[in-house]
Amino acid sequence: MALLFFFILAICTRPGLLESPSTVRLVGGSHRCEGRVEVEQDGQWHLVCDDDWDKNDVAVVCRELGCGAAKEALGGILYKPPPEKWQKFLFQNVNCSGIEDTLAHCEKDEDIIDCSLNEAAGALCEDADSPVFEEVRLADGPGPCKGRVEVKYQDQWSPVCKTGWNLKATKVVCHQLGCGRAILAQKYCNKATQGQGPIWPSQISCSGKEITLQNCTSEPWGKNNCTFDDHVWVECEDVFDLRLVGGDMPCSGRLEVLHKGVWGSVCDDGWGKKEDEVVCKQLGCGKSLSPSFKVRKSYGPGVGRIWLDDVRCSGEEQSLEQCKHRFWGYHDCTHKEDVAVICSE
């Protein structure tokens, strides 16, 4: 009987979100409760097809996000930036009754999906209880990538409460501001770095995968007990200064990065075309020409510090500091392994 029960359970349990809890977000809207519907699974954000998408489906998304009542079912094509070309559809023909707690509990097709990127679903929720700030900044720090987290709402800047804040939220802020990797999330500020405006009256929690802080989950408006001793101070890596040296033109040569006022080289461990593309993009030098090993080595070895090693980019980054890499100065390389890049312009 036990074996029979196991067999029945095995063939009746359908793989999907109920076995692997998902996260839903709305992207590209004017606030976190409006935008293109995206669902996270296995660390990737996927799209929902708008076939049969209606207000009942939107009602479930709004409920899952704590965004009040559903206002309208929209096409995701309305929201910018558009989906990434690599994004895939996870659901088609979603059919919610409107009373489910999450999109994972609705009927839907997951196995055979035939949708194009311009058929992504969108949603607009009421968002009655959660006003959404318009801008984010790091205040009173030594530069734009370090400081006290503040958000702007109705022309007033407010510090953010430490409750619920973590390094994942810091990662989102660093990315949103065009800075490098998240280094520090400090849950207190000294007297010299305390803000003066009213504290943002909503707790913010992020998964670390959101595009902006506005896309993170917020608790209902006014639910915190923070004081001016509870501000958040974060630090991100500064934007890298790059240069290509040893070539006849500024868009070709051995790659060097500036750190603590000193130029140093980058080790070629794991370096490839995607990393080349990010460097060319950051320098405004067009596309990478993907030179051969022999051509790369024609620029000769560098001298002095080797600053970076094991750099890993997806190719979508706008600048090199947004790529993964070891800590500054940590490497197992010699200057014979210095990176060189040749761009098209």
Image (spheres, rainbow, N blue to C red):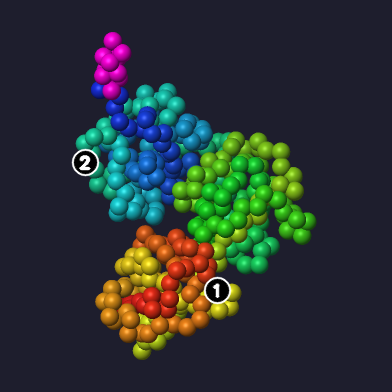
Mark number, residue 336: none
Percent x, y of residue 18: 37, 29
Q: Which portion, as a residue range, is magenta?
A: 1-10
Residue assigned mark 1: 259
Percent x, y of residue 245: 42, 84
Q: Earlier in the sequence, mark 2 or mark 1?
A: 2
Q: Residue placed at 67% from the left, 49% from the top?
A: 187
Q: Quadrant of residue 20?
A: top left
Spot the residue most to the bottom. Answer: 248
Q: Amino acid at mark 1?
A: His
Q: Establish if 306 lies above or below 67.
A: below
Whether residue 233 is visible to the viewer of this picture, yes or no, is yes
Q: Quadrant of the N terminus?
A: top left
Discs 2/1, front: 1
Q: Residue placed at 44% from the left, 82% from the top?
A: 302
Q: Nearer the viewer, residue 219 or 304?
A: 304
Q: Secondary structure at mark 1?
A: strand
Percent x, y of residue 34: 45, 43
Residue assigned mark 2: 114
Q: Quadrant of residue 338?
A: bottom left
Q: Establish if 271 lies above or below 229.
A: below
